[in-house]
Image (spheres, rainbow, N blue to C red):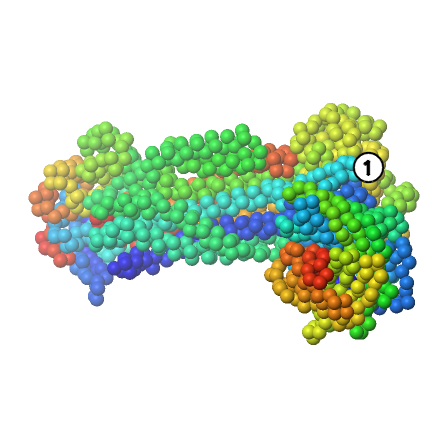
């Protein structure tokens, strides 16, 4: 199993008592598998993804990635995993504003020490002619394409996508979503994708539903 | 309602007390340095004014002898009997503790009514003052320096510092002179007189000595101080501008809400203006106290400098006028207004629903940079106009224009530099580092401009001072040829001294001189004997090849650089000297530290032409230790010890004056640099909170917060390093202007420029350390930032 | 005794400026020469200075008239004051006062000089007194040229005496108080004057009468005397009167004088014979000064009203006083000079 999440619990400080956001979540993603995570806004999808990506610690449970418990790693260890094995695509602001599209695309690959051709990536993402531009000059859909390309260019084993189309209109969103799923499949990369769209979730190999901090599906 | 709005606005400062502290600190530092320098200048000017007033009778025309000799009492009487209301003045110096004291002898009977000297003498003191044994008067501080005068010395208020006021007879006796130095001409003369040229053709009218004269000599010194004060003020304003801008930007949501709740833009601007005014007042008061402390700390050195360099007496104690306090507050308010104007205008024009864009605030557009570059070009043009204009003021315009141009051009130059370096970058992090540095530049440029100014001022002034020191010490070594300097009490002892020294020394060189007016300016005329030590040691800037041979046969005259520049004289030119005779300039020598002109002629000529010359000073050449000869002169020959000064002591004294002169400059240098450091700190702190959107993606991609913090620190150091590299040529340009233009205009001498790379290295370390230190805190804050803060970038609507 | 001296001395007492210089006269005259009742004048020697005494003066006042009838007054004074006893030239301080009273105002000037130089001094034979360019020179004191100038005036006068020098008091010994303070005092009241005034309005040719006082002393006042009023009058018949009233701080006064007949014969007046009563005051220089007087001398059936020609004739010198020409009406019409001090 590529990723094994066991009994993860996450609480946030509340006004009088802590609010439990994740209440013993267990799940797994196999290598090359595309898994959709659905749920209402505030159901804990983002938090689960952040914990898996090592961006946020959890209070209980374990996140085992290729046999290593990520929750046992320090800041530097988790950063190292993010650099080479797990890529993250967020809803927005994925790109480094001071770098060009070309530099953004190859940034993570270079961090991971993987050879990547920006031209090829642009070709496959439909971003030809945009390489010299800066993120702020691109539309939201294009920016997300760059983020997807960047995430995949580093040849990670797993891509975590947190509502990657949440800020896009429906047509653009669908196109980006489909691109992400297709690219992940092409490269046999594991993909855990959070979305509130049932329709898009249907494109995945498997669906999980998160409700009130628990997996129900 | 207004009160509620004020509370909403002020709540910002409660949440961000540090921002308030930087704002107050920047403003009060700026005010403090400015008003400190102003206080020093004002104190000095006041002292000059007092001295000149009391000396010149507040602007009276004077009669003096053309040859500088004293005016005999008979001549004074003849002029009075010719129907002229004139009053004699004896003006000389006596030795006192901690330097000389000026002796001013006046005639209370004929002193024109209403003149400061006449007013300084209280009626009850008048009769006790009369006569050669009359009472002498000095201000309480000066009185403590005059220990040998006993009961005769009385203290009085309203007498200029460093001055001993006496009856003419007593003054003449004290300075050992027969006759008067000048006659003051009463502005209200009787109806009819015998023409002056019939009574005393040797006298000529001279415009009064005023504060201007002393002021002119010391102008450059004060301009230096003022320039520093202004520089510090400008640097301080960078801080204020940064803090105010940030506070406004961060409160945009509050402004927006208040506007939505029905507060008019006008009212909002008004309240913000009030808020700023309150801050400016508080900072102004703090600044004035700081200024007072700075001035009080520096004034003794300034006073010592002015006394040593120009013979200008400045009170070592600070007395400040209410005007000074008010101007300090005013400058704080003005500075705040200047720094906050753009922010207020933006608030006034803010559309009701504009979103907060802190990042946009920090990022100046390319057009802004181009605009700034154009302004730099204009400043350069102004600088060149100043250069073409010449004179002291032109020199300062050149200096100011040059510095402003350099500061304004800095962001563009840095941008080009960074882009160039970025090309060489390998690896994603390095690429990102340079790209990000380039993007951060606008936000940091104000602080970096401040740093550039501080650094180049440091390099420039440091180079000038060090060049001066090198030249000056070398020149002293050559110029102080005699091993021992002896002053006789009485010229009648000359043969005895010669005989006494015949076997005990290698040579005795008379150093006789007369004070006179040469070509309309005050000057000293010295006589030298024909001795190889002069030709071997005396450094000449320009000379006829046979200059010393000519001196040996009693011909020609050497002049100092000041006189040469002032009158445009070069070797070969004729030189008209007092007494109406002419000789030829045969050489020009440098004469650092001397504000007036000097002429050196063969000694026999001096004695022949100016029999009244002071013939009491001698230089003695000794083989080996001077101590035994000193002892012999004091014990066997009976000269007071204070009349014997050896070369080492003289050199030490000269150098100590020199060091004190620049101690003030050094202190101001350090303060300016500190201000620049604070500017960097505040800018970085300002930027830190806005940089999350730029940093969060990098962090998400697997760069730890600690690494990011380290990168931030490196960035500050790198930028400071680049700025330093650019500051070196700017500083050297500044040094060149100071040495080759300002000094020549102000003092009349030009100094060769020496480079001291080791000093720069030290300064580089200092500035990098300052930048590193300034960025340490923001970097640590970043390293400890909770991940949730970073996560929020991706998930929250901003 | 001459009122001018008194005025000077009194003000000296009030002013610390002169406390050790011109003044101190009311206190002690130790080590200075003292007036001697048996002393008799010897001319021309006594026209010169007497440096053993503390104070001395040469004092001329002139009533002058222009061709158009405009009256003018002129004053020329030289004071000598010793700083120390012994008579050394360097211990002397000289002070000159010159004034012209005109319809446009009172113009005056003051000069000071230290002794022991040629800046100021007096010689008896030939007579010459000067301070700076101010001169009073003659072949002798009966034929003198008097000149002085200030920023706005100048005068050049020739004075010729038509009568003898007149000793005041008892053969020139003039007593100033009950306590016996005294001076040596003589006058020359018989000058006829011609000359030129130079004023801002131009030159004015004048003629008239002048009066010279010579007096020297060392301690002429008591320390309770506060001021005085002095007149020198030329009557139309050729008689002259010198009279003064010394005011004491208890309100009493010591009033003496000399009646001088047209031939120069003096008759000293005892204390109380002459009566002087202020009639009208003028506000000048911030003080109220009596500028109109009723004076009577019953022994000579004299009852006159003396009135200032120019009531603003104030001398704003270091020692300020009032000094100016007067007209005389009543039983003995004429003209003269009035001096008042201590107001």
Name which residue lies at 24% across and 57% down.
A58
Q: Is residue B724 left or right of residue C95?
A: left
Q: Quadrant of the C terminus of chain C?
A: bottom right
Position in image of residue B54 (x %, y %): 67, 50
Q: Is residue A217 left or right of residue A99?
A: left
Which residue is more in the foreground, B321 or B254? B321
Q: Quadrant of the N terminus of chain C?
A: bottom right
Name which residue lies at 65% across and 35% down.
B749
Which residue is more in the foreground, B717 or C297? C297
Q: Chain of mark 1?
A: B
Q: Is residue B722 left or right of residue C144?
A: left
Image quadrant of residue A57? bottom left
Q: Which residue is mark 1?
A: B610
Position in image of residue B644 (x %, y %): 81, 49
Name which residue lies at 86% across and 39% down.
B507
Whether residue B779 is visible, yes or no, is no
Name which residue lies at 51% across and 51% down.
B35
């Amino acid at each position: 199993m590529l990723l094994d999440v066991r009994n993860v619990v996450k609480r946030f400080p509340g006004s009088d008592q802590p609010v439990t956001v994740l209440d013993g979540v267990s799940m797994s993603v196999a290598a090359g598998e595309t898994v959709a995570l659905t749920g209402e806004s505030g159901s804990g999808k983002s938090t689960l993804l952040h914990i898996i990506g090592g961006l946020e610690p959890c209070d209980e449970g374990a996140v085992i990635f290729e046999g290593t418990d990520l929750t046992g790693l320090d800041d530097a260890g988790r950063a190292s995993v993010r650099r080479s094995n797990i890529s993250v695509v967020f809803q927005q602001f994925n790109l480094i504003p001071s770098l060009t599209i070309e530099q953004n695309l190859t940034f993570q690959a270079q961090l991971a020490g993987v050879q990547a051709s920006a031209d090829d990536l642009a070709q496959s993402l439909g971003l030809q002619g945009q390489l010299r531009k800066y993120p702020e000059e691109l539309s939201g859909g294009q920016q997300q394409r760059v983020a997807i390309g960047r995430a995949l260019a580093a040849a990670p084993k797993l891509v975590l996508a947190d509502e990657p189309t949440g800020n896009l209109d429906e047509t653009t969103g669908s196109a980006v979503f489909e691109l992400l799923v297709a690219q992940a499949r092409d490269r046999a990369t594991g993909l855990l994708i959070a979305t509130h769209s049932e329709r898009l979730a249907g494109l995945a190999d498997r669906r999980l539903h998160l409700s009130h901090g628990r997996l129900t599906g | 309602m207004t009160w509620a709005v004020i509370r909403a606005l002020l709540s910002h400062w409660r949440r961000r007390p540090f921002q308030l502290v930087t704002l107050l600190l920047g403003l009060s530092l700026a005010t403090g340095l400015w008003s400190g320098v102003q206080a020093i200048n004002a104190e000095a000017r006041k002292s000059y004014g007092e001295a000149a007033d009391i000396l010149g009778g507040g602007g009276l025309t004077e009669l003096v002898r053309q040859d500088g000799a004293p005016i005999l009492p008979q001549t004074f009487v003849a002029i009075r009997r010719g129907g002229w209301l004139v009053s004699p003045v004896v003006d000389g110096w006596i030795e006192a503790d901690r330097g000389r004291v000026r002796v001013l002898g006046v005639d209370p009977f004929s002193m024109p009514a209403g003149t400061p000297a006449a007013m300084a003498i209280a009626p009850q003191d008048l009769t006790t003052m009369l006569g050669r044994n009359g009472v002498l008067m000095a201000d309480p501080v000066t009185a403590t320096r005059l220990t040998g005068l006993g009961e005769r010395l009385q203290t009085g208020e309203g007498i200029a510092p460093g001055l001993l006021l006496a009856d003419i007879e007593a003054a003449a006796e004290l300075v050992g002179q027969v006759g008067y130095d000048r006659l003051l001409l009463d502005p209200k003369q009787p109806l009819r007189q015998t023409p002056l040229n019939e009574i005393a053709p040797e006298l000529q009218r001279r415009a009064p000595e005023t504060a201007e004269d002393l002021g002119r000599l010391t102008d450059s010194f004060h301009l230096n101080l003022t320039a520093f004060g202004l520089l510090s003020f400008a640097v301080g304003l960078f801080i204020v501008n940064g803090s105010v801008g940030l506070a406004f930007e961060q409160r945009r949501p509050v402004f927006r809400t208040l506007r939505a709740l029905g507060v008019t833009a006008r009212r909002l601007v008004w309240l913000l203006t009030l808020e700023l005014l309150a801050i400016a007042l508080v900072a102004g008061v703090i600044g004035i106290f700081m200024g007072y402390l700075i001035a009080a700390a520096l004034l003794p050195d300034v006073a010592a400098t002015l006394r040593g360099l120009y013979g200008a007496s400045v009170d070592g104690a600070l007395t400040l006028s209410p005007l000074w306090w008010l101007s300090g507050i005013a400058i704080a308010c003005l500075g705040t207004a200047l720094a906050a104007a753009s922010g207020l205008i933006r608030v006034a024009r803010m559309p009701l629903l504009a979103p907060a864009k802190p990042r946009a605030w920090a990022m100046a557009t390319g057009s802004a940079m181009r605009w700034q570059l154009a302004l730099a070009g204009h400043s350069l043009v102004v600088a060149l106009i100043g250069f073409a204009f010449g004179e002291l003021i032109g020199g300062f315009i050149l200096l100011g224009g040059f510095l402003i141009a350099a500061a304004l051009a800095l962001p563009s130059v840095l941008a080009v530099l960074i882009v160039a370096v970025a090309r060489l970058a390998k690896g994603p992090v390095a690429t990102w580092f340079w790209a990000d540095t380039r993007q951060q530049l606008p936000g940091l440029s104000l602080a970096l401009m401040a740093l550039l100014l501080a650094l180049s001022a440091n390099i420039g002034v440091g180079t000038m001072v060090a060049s001066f020191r090198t030249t000056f010490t070398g020149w002293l070594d050559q110029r102080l040829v005699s091993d021992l300097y002896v002053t006789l009490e009485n010229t009648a002892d000359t043969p005895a001294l010669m005989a006494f020294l015949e076997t005990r020394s290698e040579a005795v060189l008379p150093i006789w001189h007369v004070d006179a007016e040469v070509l309309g300016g005050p000057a000293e005329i010295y006589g030298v004997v024909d001795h190889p030590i002069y030709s071997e040691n005396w450094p000449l800037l320009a000379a006829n090849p046979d200059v010393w041979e000519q001196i040996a046969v009693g011909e020609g005259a050497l002049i100092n650089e000041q006189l040469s520049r002032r009158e445009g004289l070069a070797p070969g030119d004729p030189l008209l000297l007092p007494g109406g005779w002419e000789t030829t300039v045969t050489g020009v020598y440098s004469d650092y530290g001397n504000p007036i002109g000097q002429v050196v002629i063969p000694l026999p000529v001096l004695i022949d032409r100016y029999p009244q010359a002071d013939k009491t000073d001698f230089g003695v050449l000794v083989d080996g230790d001077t101590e035994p000869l000193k002892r012999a002169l004091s014990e066997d020959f009976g000269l007071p010890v204070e009349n014997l000064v050896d070369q080492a002591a003289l050199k030490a004294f000269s150098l100590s004056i020199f060091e004190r002169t620049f101690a003030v400059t050094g202190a101001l240098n350090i303060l300016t640099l500190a201000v620049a450091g604070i500017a960097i700190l505040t800018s970085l702190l300002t930027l830190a909170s806005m940089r999350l959107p730029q940093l969060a993606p990098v962090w998400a991609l697997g760069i730890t917060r600690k690494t990011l913090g380290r990168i931030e620190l490196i960035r500050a150091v790198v930028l400071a390093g680049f700025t330093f590299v650019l500051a070196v040529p700017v500083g050297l340009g500044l040094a060149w202007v100071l040495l080759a233009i300002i000094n020549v205009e102000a003092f009349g001498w030009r100094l060769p420029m020496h480079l001291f790379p080791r000093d720069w290295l030290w300064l580089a370390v200092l500035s990098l350390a300052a930048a590193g230190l300034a960025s340490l805190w923001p970097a640590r804050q970043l390293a400890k930032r909770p991940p949730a803060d970073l996560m929020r970038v991706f998930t929250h609507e901003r | 005794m001459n009122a001018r001296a008194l005025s000077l001395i009194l003000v000296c007492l009030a002013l610390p400026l002169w406390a050790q210089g011109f003044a101190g006269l009311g206190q002690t005259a130790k080590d200075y020469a003292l007036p001697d009742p048996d002393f008799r004048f010897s001319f021309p020697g006594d026209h010169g200075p007497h440096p053993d005494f503390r104070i001395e003066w040469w004092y001329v006042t002139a009533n002058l008239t222009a061709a158009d009838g405009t009256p003018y007054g002129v004053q020329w004074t030289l004071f000598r004051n010793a700083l120390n006893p012994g008579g050394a030239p360097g211990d002397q301080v000289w002070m000159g006062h010159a004034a012209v009273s005109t319809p446009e105002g009172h113009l005056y000037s003051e000069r000071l000089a230290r002794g022991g130089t040629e800046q100021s001094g007096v010689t008896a034979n030939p007579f010459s007194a000067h301070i700076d360019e101010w001169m009073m020179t003659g072949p002798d004191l009966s034929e003198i040229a008097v000149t002085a100038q200030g920023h706005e005036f100048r005068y050049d006068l020739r004075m010729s005496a038509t009568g003898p020098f007149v000793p005041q008091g008892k053969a020139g010994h003039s007593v100033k108080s009950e306590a016996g303070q005294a001076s040596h005092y003589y006058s020359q009241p018989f000058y006829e004057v011609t000359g030129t005034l130079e004023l801002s309005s131009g030159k004015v040719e004048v003629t008239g009468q002048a009066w010279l006082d010579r007096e020297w002393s060392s301690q002429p006042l008591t320390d309770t005397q506060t001021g005085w009023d002095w007149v020198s009058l030329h009557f139309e018949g050729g008689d002259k009167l010198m009279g003064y009233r010394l005011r004491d701080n208890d309100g009493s006064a010591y009033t003496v004088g000399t009646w001088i007949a047209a031939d120069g014969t003096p008759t000293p007046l005892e204390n109380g014979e002459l009566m002087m009563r202020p009639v009208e005051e003028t506000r000048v220089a911030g003080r109220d000064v009596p500028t109109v007087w009723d004076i009577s001398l019953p022994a000579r059936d004299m009852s006159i009203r003396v009135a200032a020609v120019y009531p603003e004739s104030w001398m704003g010198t270091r020692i300020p006083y009032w000094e100016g020409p007067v007209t005389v009406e009543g039983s003995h019409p004429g003209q003269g000079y009035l001096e008042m001090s201590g107001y």
